[in-house]
Amino acid sequence: DAVGGNDSGKLDSFVSKEDGHYWSRYDVAGGYTAKGGGGCESYPTLQVLNDGSLVGSYLDPDCFKGGVPTCSHVYLYRSTDHGQHFSRTDVTPAAQKTWQMEYVWMSATPDGKKLGFAVYGRPTTKDAWKVYGTTFAPGKKPILTLLDPVAVTQAGFPEAPGDFLMSTFDNAGKMTTTWTRAAQQVDIGDGGATGEGQRSLFRDIYSATSK
């Protein structure tokens, strides 16, 4: 199973019952806003649980001002029929409803009893991007925790580092988040998607694990 977007507001799931030889395509509930015209669009994530059900996510930027998203919604997707139909739940943390966020990565324990995600976020477009994470039970509202007080970009840069951000649970139910921090940044004045408007001579890689 896989999930992808068409850059115009539509999410599709791709399902194969023949080990990848043939695929069927299905609509994913809700789609996304797709008003940004480049910049801060995200990518869907997907995980298969032990019972064959699917857990996925998409970070949908909205509240646009001058073509720049000033807030975002984190959506949780679940499917129990191998990607043919999905339910959608808004799991945006209450304290970050007006934040700009980018590059969410949803994960789950193999039994689906614990969920979590990592995300870059900032209160306003004038702030620096920092990395946050959360774990929560299905049906509960997540609360973001700052994983590192050191910002991953300089203040005011248009986007978070687009190279790498992920989260995963181990067999003990602890979630590990791995991210990159841009170093010696150069702004070339083109704030497009995945950070091509900002160049860094080096990237440092960090990780944090929940207790």
Image (spheres, grey):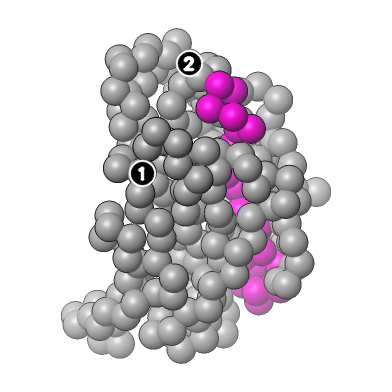
Type of the residue with mark 2: Ala
Packing grade of label 1 (10 A; few <14, some 14-19, many >=20) is some
Residue stretch rendered in magenta on the structure: 108-128
Residue linked to disc 2: 183
Q: Disc 1 or disc 2, which is closer to the eye?
A: 1
User: In the figure, is residue 155 to the left or right of 21?
Assistant: right
Secondary structure beneath label 1: loop
Q: Nearer the viewer, residue 67 or 105?
A: 67
Instruction: State the count of labels.
Output: 2
The image shows residue 190 at horizontal and vertical percentages of 29, 23
The image shows residue 56 at horizontal and vertical percentages of 50, 66
Give me the C-alpha separation between circle 1 and circle 2: 27 Å
Q: Nearer the viewer, residue 3 or 61?
A: 61
Q: Is residue 186 above or below residue 150?
A: above
Label 1 with label 2: CB-CB less than 8 Å: no
Is residue 174 magenta-colored? no
Type of the residue with mark 1: Gly
Secondary structure beneath label 2: strand
Residue linked to disc 1: 36
Q: Nearer the viewer, residue 40 or 4?
A: 40
Farthest residue toward the left? 21
Query: Mark 1 or mark 2: which comes first in sequence?
Result: 1
Residue found at x 43% / y 26%: 158
Location of the N terminus (image quadrant): bottom left
Q: Is residue 101 shown to the viewer in this render?
A: no
The image shows residue 187 at horizontal and vertical percentages of 36, 14
Q: Which mark is residue 106?
A: none
Residue found at x 30% / y 87%: 17
User: In the figure, is residue 171 to the left or right of 100?
Assistant: right
Q: Is residue 78 shown to the viewer in this render?
A: yes
Is residue 116 magenta-colored? yes
